[in-house]
Amino acid sequence: MGEINWGNFCGLFRGQYVPDSFTFQMGRELRELKQGKSTVVEYTQRFNELIRYSMDVNGALDEKAKMNKYRYGLR
């Protein structure tokens, strides 16, 4: 197989050990995530948990999409 970088390793690992249903659920929760009554710290922690596993149709969300999602989810 040769050398593998961290990003490829993570993708292969998730593909093998993280069910698609879990990834789908995390993506749905991320799309619906709003700060609401949470503190900024609580919102940020949940955002980071969800973003780790959620994927868009082309793979991982790009940095601009992550920033926009985070910002628009705040109060």
Image: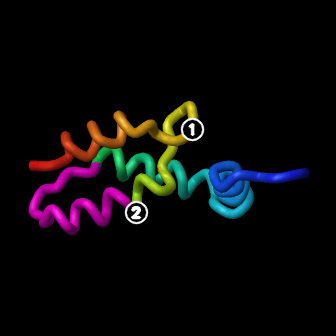
Q: Residue furthest top?
A: 58
Disc marking residue 35: none
- Residue 18 picture location, percent across and down: 63, 60
Number of dots carrying numbers: 2
Q: How is the image coloured?
A: rainbow
Q: Residues within 10 Å of mark 2 (few under 14, many from 20)?
A: few
CA distance for labels 1 and 2: 17 Å
* The image quarter in which residue 22 lies: bottom right
Secondary element under disc 1, as helix, strand or loop, is loop
Q: Position of residue 53 (x, y in %)?
A: 50, 55
In the picture as drawn, the residue positioned furthest to the right comes out as: 1
Compared with 72, 75 (above or below) is below
- Whichever of labels 1 and 2 marks the residue nearer the N terminus, that label is 2
Residue 73 % position (x, y)? 20, 46
The residue located at (26%, 46%) in the rendering is 70
- Compared to residue 56, the image places residue 9 above or below, namely below
Residue at 12% from the left image edge and 56% from the top image edge: 36
Q: Quick check: is 34 in the magenta stretch?
A: yes
- Residue at left 54%, top 32%? 57
Can you identify the residue that label 1 sits on?
59
Badge 2 marks a residue whose secondary structure is helix
Measured as percent of width and height from the top left, residue 21 is found at 57, 53
Please give the label number shown on residue 49. 2
Type of amino acid at the residue the image marks with label 1: Gly
Whether residue 22 appears in magenta in the rendering, the answer is: no
Q: Identify residue type, mark 2.
A: Glu
Compared across the picture, whether 60 is left or right of 70 comes to right
Q: Which residues are magenta?
A: 33-49
Left or right of 11 on screen, residue 49:
left
Q: Nearer the viewer, residue 56 or 62?
A: 62
x 52%, y 42%: residue: 60
Left or right, 73 with reference to 21: left
